[in-house]
Amino acid sequence: MKTCIIYYSKHHGNTKKLLDAIKAVDPEVEFIDATEKREADLNGYDRIGFASGVYYGKFAEQVLTFAKVNLPPQKEVFFLATAGNPMKSNFNSIASVADDKQSKELGRFQCKGFDTFGPFKLVGGIQKGHPTEDEVAEAVNFYKNL
């Protein structure tokens, strides 16, 4: 299956840690950094992933905008997230975009991520040490079982 993952991983590289581990088991997977590329033809991919840290309860705006502009209709999609406060609702923003495109959702993965965004910076951050090796391994298993 030809797979592409569009991602945003800025502050601590939490999301990129998951993606690097996925790349180690699937060297054919392609990544698009949503901060470097705003448009891409995704029609040639069988599966399209969206990966991001969570900012105020939603995926990064760069990933959401990329999906709105570039996600072809009726594609198979999956989501990966790292968050200081992992909640199911963190996927609502990206799932809404995928729903608008009549995408078939294959799954969601979320784990804790070290977070110093916004007010958390004042207290030295939360979820230090995350994602852990176990969480990274869980992300790889999620991907392998799509």
Image (cartoon, rainbow, N blue to C red):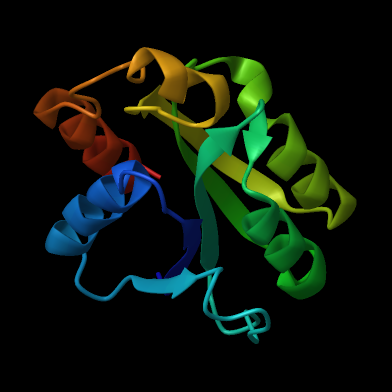
The quadrant of the rendering that contains the C terminus is top left
Q: Say if 48 sits above or below 53 in the image.
A: below
Closer to us: 42 or 136 = 136
**Does the rendering let one see residue 79?**
yes
Image location of residue 101, percent across then percent down: 84, 58
Residue furthest out toward the front:
122
Q: Residue at x 21, y 57 (%)?
A: 20
Q: Say if 51 sits above or below 108 in the image.
A: below
Q: Quadrant of residue 37?
A: bottom right
Q: How many marks?
A: 0
Q: Residue at x 18, y 52 (%)?
A: 21
Q: Say if 20 sits above or below 114 in the image.
A: below
Position of 63 with respect to 129 (left or right) is: right
Q: Residue at x 31, y 43 (%)?
A: 12
Image location of residue 125, percent across then percent down: 36, 20
**Does the rendering let one see residue 84?**
no
Closer to us: 67 or 129 = 129
Position of 106 with respect to 121 (left or right) is: right
Closer to us: 132 or 121 = 121
The quadrant of the rendering that contains the N terminus is bottom left
Image location of residue 63, percent across then percent down: 63, 57
Image location of residue 47, percent across then percent down: 52, 63
Q: Residue at x 65, y 60 (%)?
A: 62
